[in-house]
Image (spheres, rainbow, N blue to C red):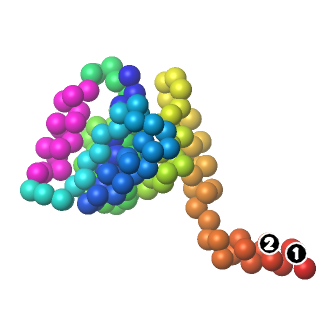
Amino acid sequence: MRRIVIASHHRFAAGLRDTLEFIGGDQLGIVDINAYVDETSLDDQIAEVFAGFDPDDEVLVFTDMMQGSVNQAFQRYIGDKVFVVTGVNVPCALELAVAGGQLAYEDIARTVQSARDQLVFMNECISVVDEDDE
């Protein structure tokens, strides 16, 4: 079974979960970890979530920032069935969350690259289009 965990500083994870469930449906079964909103330790929150998973589960973790403490806390969990994607955006999370079948390393890498390609400075994009119109 695929498990999806979104973890972030403060409440970004809850917002992203809400957005994904709005677009992809509640059946995604996303767990969100919103770090540093109360006194609960991040390590304890992560351990509690993983304790509820079966060892055969495929776990897809999305975190907010590569150098952040939240992402670093998940590094020890990375393995053959646990994939961590950081700097996540909605298109990336949605595509991987609703992907059918078992995820392969190459599928995740391709989706991450596609998400990078969608990060666009629109002022430059509009400027190029306007110049082509003349």
Residue occupying image coordinates x 21% and y 42%:
46
Residue occupying image coordinates x 54% and y 49%:
91
Q: Amino acid at mark 1?
A: Asp
Residue 37 position, x and y percent, is 18, 59
Quadrant containing the N terminus in the rendered view: top left
Question: Label 1: which residue?
Answer: 133
Left or right, 47 with respect to 115, comes to left
Secondary structure of the magenta portion, mostly?
helix
Left or right, 111 with respect to 12, comes to right
Q: Residues within 10 Å of mark 2 (few under 14, many from 20)?
A: few
Q: Which element is circle 2 on?
A: helix
Residue 90 position, x and y percent, is 49, 51
Left or right, 17 with respect to 53, comes to right
Q: Amino acid at mark 2?
A: Val
Q: Which residues are magenta?
A: 40-53
Q: Check whether the beta carbons of the residues at disc 2 and disc 1 lie within 8 A of each other.
A: yes
Quadrant containing the C terminus in the rendered view: bottom right
**72 or 54, which is in the foreground?**
54
Number of disc labels:
2
Outermost residue to the right:
134
**15 or 3, which is in the foreground?**
15
Q: Of the numbered discs in the image, which one, if any, rests on residue 104?
A: none
Question: Can the viewer see residue 86 in this picture?
Answer: no
Q: Residues within 10 Å of mark 1 (few under 14, many from 20)?
A: few
Q: Is residue 104 above or below residue 34?
A: above
Q: Is residue 113 above or below residue 83?
A: below
Q: Of the numbered discs in the image, which one, if any, rests on residue 129?
A: 2
